[in-house]
Amino acid sequence: MQDYIILDYDGTIHDTMRIYKEAFLKAYEWLVQEGKAARREFDDSQISRWLGFNSKEMWNTFMPTLEEEYKTKASGMIGEFMVQQVIQGGASLYDGAEKVLEELKRDGNRLIFLSNCKEAYRDVHRRFFGLDRFFDDFYCCETYDFIPKGDIIPYILKEHPGNYLSIGDRGSDFAAARQNGIPFIACLYGFGSREEYEEAERFANDVKELPGLVRSLRTVKNS
C-alpha cells in the first residue's frame, strides 16, 4: 500500500511571518482608521498565534464582535497583500525545505498539501515555488467552506487510500491527525507550542529533521 504524508504548509514548510506580519498590521490599521479597532502595538508572538487558523476562525476569535462585512474585508486585505508579496518575491520557504521535500519523495512517500488557506494563496505558492514537483495533491479549507482539517482528511483518505503520517506545527494539525487515527510529527520550529501537541509521536526542531523522523516512525509502525 502506498505511503502518504499529509503536510501542513505555513509554519511547516513556509516561513509565513515574512509576509503575514505586514499584512496583518495593514489590515488592523485599516480597522483603526474605520473606527472599528483601538490603536495598539503587537509583538510577533501576538501576530503569529493566528497562523494555523483559517480566516473565519481567526477573526471570530480575534475580534468576535466585529461586523461580518469588516471581518470579510480585513481578511481579504490580508490575503491579497500576502499573494502580492509572493508574486514580488517576498515569501520564503524554510532553509532546506525544498531538499527535505525532495528527500521525502525519494524515500517513496507521496505528499499531500493540506492548509487552512484560501485557494488563491495556495495557487500562487504552487506557481512561485513549483510545488507540483513535490506534492501529489493539494487541499485547502476554502474549497470545503472552511471546515476543520480533521473533517477534510476523510476526503483525502477516500481519494488517496494508503498508509498515512501527518506533519504540522499547530494543535489543530495534531487534532486533525488524532481525529483520523494518523501518527503525527510536530514541528517545534513553527508557530505553535509543545503544549499544543504534547502527545505527538515525534518532534522536529528543524525542517531538516523531518526525513529522519518519518523514517523512524515508519519503521516503528511497520515493525
Image: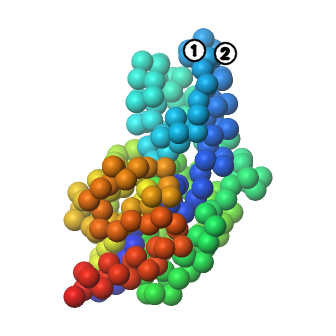
Please state the total of marks drawn on the protein image: 2
Point 61% across, 72% down: residue: 96
Q: Secondary structure at mark 2?
A: helix
Figure quadrant of the N terminus: bottom left
Q: Residue beneath label 1, please?
A: 38
Q: Residue furthest right?
A: 88
Vertical relation: 108 (above or below) 187:
below
- x, y (%) of residue 59? 46, 31
Residue closest to the eye, 97 or 110? 97
Q: Nearer the viewer, mark 1 or mark 2?
A: 1
Q: Is residue 174 visible?
A: yes
Q: Residue at x 60, y 11 (%)?
A: 35
User: Which quadrant of the rendered structure holds the C terminus?
Assistant: bottom left
CA gap, disc 1 and disc 2 = 9 Å
Ranked by sequence position, the earlier of labels 1 and 2 is 2
- Give the image quarter of residue 32: top right
Residue type for callout 2: Gln
**What's the mark number on residue 33?**
2
Frontmost residue, 78 versus 159: 78
Residue at disc 1, secondary structure: loop
Picture quarter containing residue 15? Answer: bottom right
Whole-percent x, y for residue 205 in the image: 48, 64
Residue at position x 63%, y 40% in the image:
21
Left or right relative to 192: residue 45:
right
How packed mark 2 is, by other alpha carbons closer than 10 Å (few <14, some 14-19, many 20 or more), is few
Q: Is residue 76 visible?
A: no
Query: In the rendered structure, which amino acid carries the disc numbered 1?
Result: Ala
Query: Camera-side residue: 79 or 98?
Result: 98
Q: Position of residue 85 (x, y in %)?
A: 72, 48
Residue at x-position 62% and y-position 17%:
39
